[in-house]
Image (tube, rainbow, N blue to C red):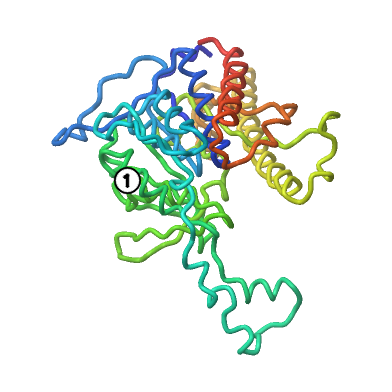
C-alpha cells in the first residue's frame, strides 16, 4: 500500500483528557513530518456549498472524526489551525493564560487553553438539596445497603461542566459554529445519556437514526464538542436542544465505541489513520505492581483494559472480515466459478459484512512498555509534562508510519 495513492485520507482521534490531546498533537507532528497536510478552514460567505471541490493534493486529510479530547483537536484542525498553533494553545505555561494571542479572525493562533477553559465548576451540584434530597423525609421505595444509599442520596451529576469548553470554542476558535461552513468534513461522536445509542454530529441534511447510532444535524460545533467531552463523573452530561425544541443529554463519546473509524469509511475515506493514547500498564521492574499505588491507578488500569480490549476486538474484526472476503474470493476463483456468479456472490458478502475493500486502516498508540505514559496525569497543562507526551506521540507515530510506503 502506497499511502500517497490514497485519494481521501481521514484522521480519527480518540479521548483521554489533555493527555490524549497532547499525544494526538505529537502524532500530527509526525504526520506532517511524513508529508501529510491538514485541510480546514471555512467557506467564504455566499460560496456555493454544493459545488464540487477541486481534488486535494496527495496525503491531505479531508475528514476528521473526534470523540472526547479528540473532538477538540479535530475541531482545531477542521477550523484551519495548524499544528504549531495548537501546540501554542496547549503549552502556555501550566495553563496560565498569556496576554499575547491574536484574535480568532487572524486564523493563525489559538488563545492559550487554560484550566479555566477546561474546568467549569458545576454550581448546581453544590446545592444541598441535590446532594441530600428527601431521602431522610421519605420512606425509600427499595431497601438495601451502600449502593441504594448512594443512588438515592447522591444526586450530583458531575463535579464540573463542559460549559467553558463550549464557550472557548465559540468565542476564540470558530469563525462559524456551523458544520456546513467548514471546508473539511468534521464528525463529533457523543453518547446519548438516556438511550444506548451513539450519536454522530456533523453536516447532515437531516437527522437519521437506528437502534444503535444516530446521525444528528441539529448541534452547533461547540455544543457537539462539549457533549462529546462530558466524561462522567468528572463532567456532567451536556444538554443540546434538537429541532423539535427538546433538550437531549449527552456524555462522553468514548462510552459506546472507542474508535469510530467506520464514520470516516462511511463518508468516503479510503485511508483511516487512528490515534489513541490508552494503553494498559505492563509490569515493569522499576515501577513494580499497581496494587502498591492505590485505587486511582487500579481504577485507571481497569478502565484502560476495558477500552484497549474493545479496540483490539475492533481491529481483530476488521482483519477477520478482510481475511474472510479474500479467502472466499480466492476459493471461488480456484473453483473456476463463472465470473458473473462469483462477482454477485462477493457483492452480497461485502454488503452483508459492511466491508470496504478500498479502505485501509492505520492505528497509532503508545507502547505497552511505556509506563511513563500510563502514569501521566490526564488533565495536566504543565508544559514539561505536555512536551513529554507530545514527544511520545511523535515517536509512536513515526515508528508506525515507517512500516508503510509513503
Q: Residue furthest top?
A: 405
Between residues 147 and 156, which one lies in front from this camera angle?
A: 156
| Point 64% across, 17% down: residue | 334
Lateral position of residue 282 relative to residue 201, left or right = right
Lateral position of residue 322 relative to residue 77, left or right = right
| Point 65% across, 24% down: residue | 327
- Image-quadrant location for residue 379: top right
Pointer 1 local density, CA inside 10 Å: few below 14, some 14–19, many at least 20: some
Q: Residue furthest left?
A: 46
Q: Position of residue 257 (x, y in %)?
A: 57, 45
| Point 57% across, 13% down: residue | 404
Q: Residue furthest front?
A: 99
Decide: is 191 above or below 301. Answer: below
| Point 44% across, 13% down: residue | 35
Between residues 96 and 386, which one lies in front from this camera angle?
A: 96
Q: Position of residue 225 (x, y in %)?
A: 42, 46
Q: Position of residue 172 (x, y in %)?
A: 32, 40
Q: Which residue is mark 1?
A: 170
- Image-quadrant location for residue 244: bottom left
Counting labels gives 1
Between residues 282 and 62, which one lies in front from this camera angle?
A: 282
Q: Secondary structure at mark 1?
A: helix
Amino acid at each position: 500500500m502506497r499511502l500517497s495513492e490514497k485519494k481521501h485520507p481521514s484522521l480519527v482521534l480518540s479521548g483521554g483528557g489533555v493527555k490524549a490531546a497532547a499525544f494526538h498533537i505529537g502524532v500530527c507532528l509526525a504526520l506532517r513530518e511524513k508529508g501529510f497536510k491538514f485541510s480546514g478552514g471555512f467557506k467564504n460567505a455566499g460560496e456555493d456549498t454544493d459545488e464540487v471541490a477541486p481534488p486535494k493534493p496527495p496525503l491531505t486529510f479531508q475528514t476528521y472524526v473526534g470523540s472526547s479530547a479528540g473532538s477538540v483537536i479535530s475541531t482545531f484542525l477542521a477550523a484551519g489551525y495548524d499544528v504549531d498553533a495548537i501546540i501554542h494553545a496547549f503549552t502556555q505555561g501550566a495553563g496560565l493564560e498569556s496576554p499575547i494571542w491574536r484574535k480568532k479572525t487572524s486564523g493563525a493562533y489559538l488563545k492559550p487553553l487554560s484550566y479555566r477553559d477546561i474546568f467549569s465548576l458545576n454550581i448546581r451540584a453544590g446545592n444541598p438539596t441535590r446532594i441530600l434530597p428527601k431521602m431522610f423525609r421519605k420512606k425509600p421505595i427499595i431497601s438495601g445497603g451502600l449502593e441504594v444509599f448512594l443512588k438515592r442520596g447522591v444526586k450530583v451529576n458531575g463535579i464540573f461542566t463542559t460549559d467553558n469548553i463550549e464557550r472557548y470554542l465559540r468565542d476564540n476558535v470558530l469563525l462559524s459554529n456551523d458544520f456546513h461552513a467548514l471546508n473539511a468534513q468534521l464528525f463529533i461522536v457523543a453518547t446519548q445519556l438516556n438511550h444506548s445509542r451513539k450519536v454522530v454530529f456533523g453536516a447532515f441534511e437531516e437527522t437519521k437514526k437506528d437502534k444503535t447510532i444516530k446521525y444528528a444535524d441539529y448541534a452547533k460545533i461547540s455544543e457537539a464538542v462539549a457533549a462529546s467531552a462530558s466524561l462522567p463523573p468528572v463532567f456532567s452530561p451536556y444538554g443540546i436542544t434538537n429541532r423539535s425544541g427538546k433538550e437531549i443529554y449527552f456524555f462522553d463519546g468514548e462510552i459506546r465505541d472507542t474508535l469510530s473509524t467506520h464514520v470516516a469509511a462511511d463518508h468516503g475515506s479510503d485511508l483511516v489513520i487512528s490515534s489513541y493514547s490508552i494503553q494498559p500498564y505492563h509490569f515493569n521492574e522499576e515501577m513494580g505492581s499497581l496494587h502498591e499505588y492505590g485505587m486511582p491507578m487500579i481504577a485507571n488500569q481497569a478502565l484502560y483494559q476495558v477500552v484497549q480490549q474493545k479496540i483490539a476486538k475492533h481491529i481483530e474484526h476488521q482483519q477477520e472480515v478482510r481475511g474472510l472476503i479474500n479467502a472466499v474470493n480466492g476459493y471461488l476463483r480456484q473453483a473456476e466459478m463463472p465470473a458473473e456468479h462469483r462477482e454477485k456472490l462477493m457483492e452480497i458478502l461485502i454488503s452483508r459484512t459492511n466491508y470496504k475493500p478500498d479502505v485501509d486502516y492505520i492505528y497509532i498508540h503508545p507502547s505497552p512498555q511505556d509506563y511513563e505514559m500510563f502514569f501521566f496525569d490526564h488533565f495536566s497543562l504543565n508544559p514539561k509534562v505536555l512536551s513529554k507526551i507530545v514527544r511520545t506521540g511523535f515517536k509512536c507515530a513515526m515508528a508506525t508510519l515507517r512500516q508503510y510506503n509513503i
